[in-house]
Amino acid sequence: MADEPADTETIASCRHRIDEIDTAFIALWQERAGLSRRISALRLSGGGTKLLLADEYELLRRFRGAIGMDGALLATLLLRAGRESVRSPHPAGRRPVPVPAPEDA
């Protein structure tokens, strides 16, 4: 069954909003990772440790409580992003999983 014109408009509107959210999410992700790396550098320069496990545990707990198991996974990825080296786009020899380019609409 083909989409009705109203459904097509609604789908297009929803997809547009998802694209906006994704753009904002990427910007926030990058900002958060940079702030986390900055905090780590400041801790190290002050003679402290790069990270605090209690802070990491709290983040995992908060995200899991709000989102469920996927929240714990998301928090783990956020923590990893904050640990990445600014100098190396592929730390420890890891390479990103290739993502297919979006098709032109």
Image (tube, helix red, strand yellow):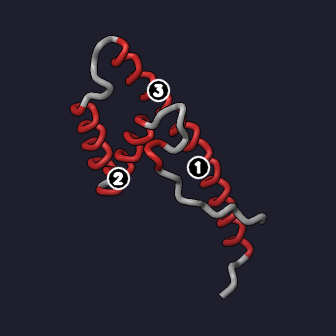
Mark 1 → mark 3, Cα distance in angstroms: 20 Å
Q: Is residue 52 above or below residue 67?
A: above
**Residue located farthest toward the front when viewing the structure as drawn:** 93
Of residues 8 and 18, the one drawn nearer to the viewer in this rendering? 18
In this rendering, which labeled residue sits more in front, label 1 or label 3?
3
User: Element at badge 1?
Assistant: helix
Q: Are marks 2 and 1 in contact (CB under 8 Å)?
A: no
**Residue located farthest toward the top when viewing the structure as drawn:** 46
In this rendering, which labeled residue sits more in front, label 2 or label 1?
2
Instruction: Indicate the quadrant where residue 79 lies.
Output: top left
Mark positioned earlier in the residue sequence (1 or 3): 1
The residue type indicated by label 2 comes to Leu
Taking the image as shown, residue 94 lies to the left or right of residue 75, namely: right
Q: Position of residue 24 (x, y in %)?
A: 59, 41
The N terminus sits in image quarter: bottom right
Which residue in the structure is indicated by mark 1?
22
Q: Position of residue 89 (x, y in %)?
A: 55, 41
**Residue located farthest toward the right when viewing the structure as drawn:** 104
